[in-house]
Amino acid sequence: MLKIRRLKLKLAARRSRLKIEENLLELDAGELSGQAKEAAIQKIAGDLDNEGFNVSKSGGKMLQLRWAMDDMLNVGRPLMKDFNNAIAALSLEDVLNPYSATSNLIDNLGETWKELKKVQCRLDIIEIVQETRLDLLVKKAKELSENESIRYLIGEQLEREVIVNKLDITEEKLAEVEAEIAKELAERERVADLLAKVDGKSDEEKVKHLITNNVAEELIIEMAEVDQAAITSAQKAMEEEIKEQQRLAEEAAAKKKAEAAGPSLEDISSDDMIDHIDSIREIMEFSEVEKEIRTMCEQSSIPQCLVDIAVSDPDKLDELEKNAEG
């Protein structure tokens, strides 16, 4: 309980210091001397009392107020004026590391404002720098499209609640973008596995492997670390391979068809001609339907040329048989 109380007291003291400096911003240092100075101190103390800081009833807080007033008069302007200007001048690059940015800020302003070099001030400054970083991140995000702005803040590891509130979007919209990102990460893992299978192979072989597995060109370039020319070259090589495979397939099909059709009339010997014609006549005694005749002839390995004659001009079989008999 004692530790919690001390922490609360420290937080209250930090807040009162900031409020004192904020109130000094409203004063004109050139008009403060003698009674005007004391009147200004009393007015600020009263205003802070009204806000619940109880400055006039605390000797320590009144000393802080008087010291802050003296510092302002010595420099000619309040500390917060220099501090606010320094904060406003920060770019996103300056605050990527809030702790480093805080140290730089203290180094730059500390020569003029010794108060900032005190350890207890660092916590306030870090908090302000972190808020400034958040503001700058949100500002940059809002320059992007809705989806890209959400992706950007997710990438900066902002909390979901902060993203929703700062971009004024719904939880459903955030979940939608998160699902897209998860899908993309899964695809990256798949591509990494594909690349592992062709590790040590040439760039062309890697690219062919990824193209075959339907990987987007943009991802191929990034993860296989190749350029567009490598993809174009691989695609051309694949086209040639496909053409060659197609040619070989067509040749094989033609050969198979020729083998199935059997020899031409000129290549059938006289004895085979007579045997085939006898078989055809037997088949035609069973059926007059062309489809059935062709099926039975095929099962009997009768040459296609004779089957065609049998179903289109059966009388010609007599002539062929006569010629075969000599």
Image (spheres, grey):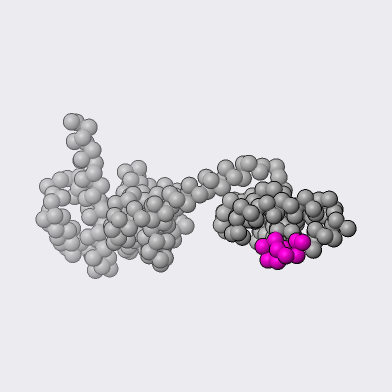
- 98 left or right of 4 in image: right
Give the quarter of the figure containing the N terminus: top left
Pick the residue in front: 68 or 178: 178
Q: Residue at x 47, y 52 (%)?
A: 184
Q: Residue at x 32, y 61 (%)?
A: 167
What residue span does the magenta drawing correspond to?
Answer: 308-318
**Horizontal and vertical percent for residue 266?**
84, 60
- The residue most toward the right is 326
Q: Main secondary structure of the magenta part?
A: helix
Q: Residue at x 29, y 61 (%)?
A: 168
**Horizontal and vertical percent for residue 65?**
22, 53
Q: How many marks?
A: 0
* Viewer can see residue 133: no
Give the quarter of the figure containing the C terminus: bottom right
Q: Is 313 a magenta residue?
A: yes
- 262 left or right of 59 in image: right
Give the image quarter of residue 250: bottom right
Q: Is 257 a magenta residue?
A: no
**Horizontal and vertical percent for residue 249?**
71, 55
- 300 left or right of 50 in image: right
| 43 to 114, vertically: above or below | below
